[in-house]
Image (tube, grey):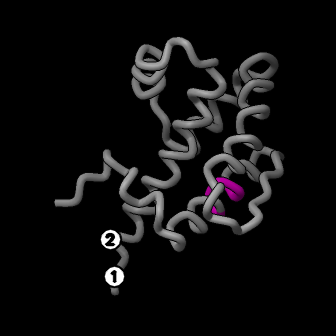
Amino acid sequence: MTNFNNISQYFNRIDLIKETANQIIKDFDMFGFEIKFSGSVYNAYEELFEQIEPHISELVNSNLQKFMSILYRIDLSDEQIKKAVNDNSSEPFSAIVSDLIIKRELQKVVIRNHYKTP
C-alpha cells in the first residue's frame, strides 16, 4: 500500500505539481481569490506559498468563517493544524496553514492519480 502521508517523494513529479497548482487555483477561485501559476515546477512551492500566505493571513484576521470554509473545502482538519502549530511553534500561523494547504492539495492529487483507472 502506498503511504500517502509522506508526499515529499512526489515533489519532483512535474505532472503532479501542475495538477496540484491547478487544484489550488480552483479551490481558491471558489472563494474569490486569484492564484496564478507560471508553470515553472522548479519553484512551484515557493510561488504558490507566496500567493496563498497573504490570503490566509488576511482571512485569519478578518473573516474566520471564510477561512474555515477554505479549510473545509481543502479538507484540512483542526487536528492537522494543531499538530503542525505545535511542531512549528516559531513559524507564523498563516505560514503553517499555507504549507499544510499545499501539501494537502498535493496529497489529494496523488491519491486521485493512484486510484484513477488506467
Is residue 64 positioned above or below 46 on the image?
above
Instruction: Decide if residue 55 is on the left or right side of residue 110.
Output: right
Residue 42: image quadrant is: bottom right
Compare residues 67 and 38 and report the one nearer the observer: 38
Q: Which mark is residue 117?
A: 1
Residue 15: x and y in percent read 52, 73
Query: Residue lying farthest front?
Result: 42
How many labels were placed on the picture?
2
State the SS at label 1. Answer: loop
Mark 1 in CB contact with mark 2 (< 8 angstroms): yes
Compare residues 98 and 13 and report the one nearer the observer: 13
Mark 2 residue crowding within 10 angstroms, few (<14) / some (14–19) / many (20+): few
C-alpha separation, residue under disc 1 versus residue under disc 2 = 6 Å
* Quadrant of the drawing holding the N terminus: bottom left
Compare residues 103 and 26 and report the one nearer the observer: 103
Compare residues 16 and 29 and report the one nearer the observer: 16
State the SS at label 2. Answer: helix
Residue 82 on the magenta segment: no
Q: Which mark is residue 115?
A: 2
